[in-house]
Image: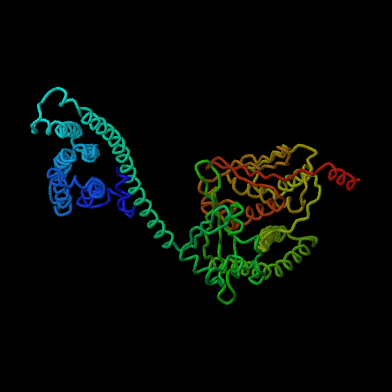
Amino acid sequence: MDRVLSHLTLNTRQFHELTLRMRVVLSQLPLSLTVLLIVVGGFLFHPDLLSSQSFLVGVGLQVVLLAVCVLVPWDRLPHASFLVIPLLDFIPIGLMRHGAGTVITGVGLLAVFPIIWLAASGLYPRAALAVGFLASLGIVWAPVFFSDAAVNLESLTQSFLLPFIMLAIGVTIRVMTASMMAQQAVVEEKDRALQVLLEESARRERLLETVVNSVDIGLMAVDEAGRPMLTNRKLEQFRALAGGTGDATEADLQIFQQDGQSAMPEARRPTRRAAEGQVFSDYLLWWGERPHQRVLSTSSRLMTNQAGTREGSVVTFNDVTELVTALNAKDEFVATVSHELRTPLTAIRGYLELLTGMPDLQPEVASGLEVVSRNSERLHKLVVDLLSAAEGSPEITPVPTDVSGLVVQRVANARERNINPQVCFEDYTEPGLVALCDASRIGQVLDNLLSNAVKYSPGGGRVTVRAAEVDGEVECSVTDQGSGMSAEELGGVFSKFFRTSAARNAAIPGVGLGLAISKAIVERHGGTISCRSVEGEGSTFTFRLPLAHVGQNQQLQSQEL
């Protein structure tokens, strides 16, 4: 019924979206149009029908009821008041049926329209079915009781089938309407829930937009194909700095490598790398041209769904120009100072060798020269460390190296240089270990670790050195029983200029470069270095290097021969 009535509105609006007055008019209109069709047919084919007074009265009442539907403000009356219209429809239908007589049969079937209206309204369903049945019965019996014909069983049962047909139609319509109303209630409930979700989604979207535009870093979210899904204002500022206007893509931006002049290849640009599923941190890029060039640190993280499938990536852009400028100035200062110290230090060490080589030195002079020599060696090591730190990535020449012999040699040297008689060395190095490495650089790593083990063991104890083959790699470790480190200090142990609180409080000499240099050397070999430490119990530093292959071992043997 709702579909039929919706068609009467030319489908411009759904029936339930109309005003109550319009819905009442459209509900009455099918009956009124059918009556009009009967009147036109009677005028054309049965002119004597229009001479029937009861038929004309019934038609007139139909016109009145349609006018009432149009004129009455049903929205201001109680909601169920419109049901009076289908109830009154039975009166003109009965009059028209009686007036049509045998000229036009079946006029009583017009009762199906108010029956459908009552049943489809959903209001008072049992009463509506009962009233519809009784009204249809009244249409059949009223002419029998009010005419001059004799009332008998035959006259009462002659058209008795009509009310039962109307009852069956009403029950059918009621069942269908109840089902549709239940479905409509479910749909409306889902619609309300959907509206709540949409409002919540819109609120979260506004919150997200506010947050991403408030942070002082550039943000970009890309899908799995690398298409931008979300950007913020800060990123747009960075893009404008790199010449990005309008629909410019990342390939059109002025992004340079570390020298600030060589264009960064498209394959190495952050969004392209993120689109390929790469995860990276602190990836430095130089944006824009000088003198307005800025250094951005970029990072990328994956976005995954509940199944763990990649849905895209989020790329961040952070301006670190001032930090990079400060680090470069610091490295230049360190390198300059180290070079300036190296020249006079070389002269001091040279003259010390001449003086200590002179015969018949008085004991006081020899002792003083020993102190000077020892401190010049410390100063020389400090200058070497500063230069190594300023150089950045150390240069290495990896060749097959007898690591077992190298470890034994460095432990022996550490024993000779040991000035703390309370510290003893234990060496558990397996023989025959051959790694692909630069012997002088790995020797520097061992010297740093052994020197630290002695320095940070002021109370004495054992310094244990182990070297063995583990998981297809050469693993070396140095363990001391010194002061150890806290968990917080352990996180920065390989940073440049890092000193523990125990080292500062005990005035242990050093500037905190040895471990940072050692980490750079090991990683340049493709290896790893790590530290385990417990405060007050000591530390263990472990590094791994790749094993030499069979052909490389044969090369080492030929070199030894």
Residue 97 appears left or right of 488: left
Residue 54 appears left or right of 162: left
Q: Give the position of the N terminus as an image quadrant.
A: top left
Residue 274, located in which quarter of the rendered image?
Answer: bottom right
Residue that protrudes farthest toward the bottom in the picture: 291
Residue 468 screen position, x and y as percent = 73, 38
Q: Is residue 338 above or below residue 395?
A: below
Residue 327, located in which quarter of the rendered image?
Answer: bottom right
Q: Is residue 124 above or below residue 320?
A: above
Residue 309 or 83: which is nearer the viewer?
83
Residue 382 appears left or right of 303: right
Q: How many marks?
A: 0
Q: Residue at x 12, y 31 (%)?
A: 144
The colour scheme is rainbow
Residue that protrudes farthest toward the top in the picture: 153
Residue 380 screen position, x and y as percent = 69, 61
Q: Is residue 253 above or below residue 48?
A: below
Residue 317 screen position, x and y as percent = 53, 62
Q: Is residue 411 above or below residue 291?
A: above
Residue 142 or 254: which is nearer the viewer?
142
Residue 294 or 429: which is nearer the viewer?
294
Q: Give the position of the C terminus as an image quadrant.
A: top right
Residue 45 screen position, x and y as percent = 26, 47
Can the viewer see residue 35?
A: no
Can the viewer see residue 250?
A: yes
Residue that protrudes farthest toward the right in the picture: 561
Residue 341, located in which quarter of the rendered image?
Answer: bottom right
Residue 136 or 361: which is nearer the viewer?
136
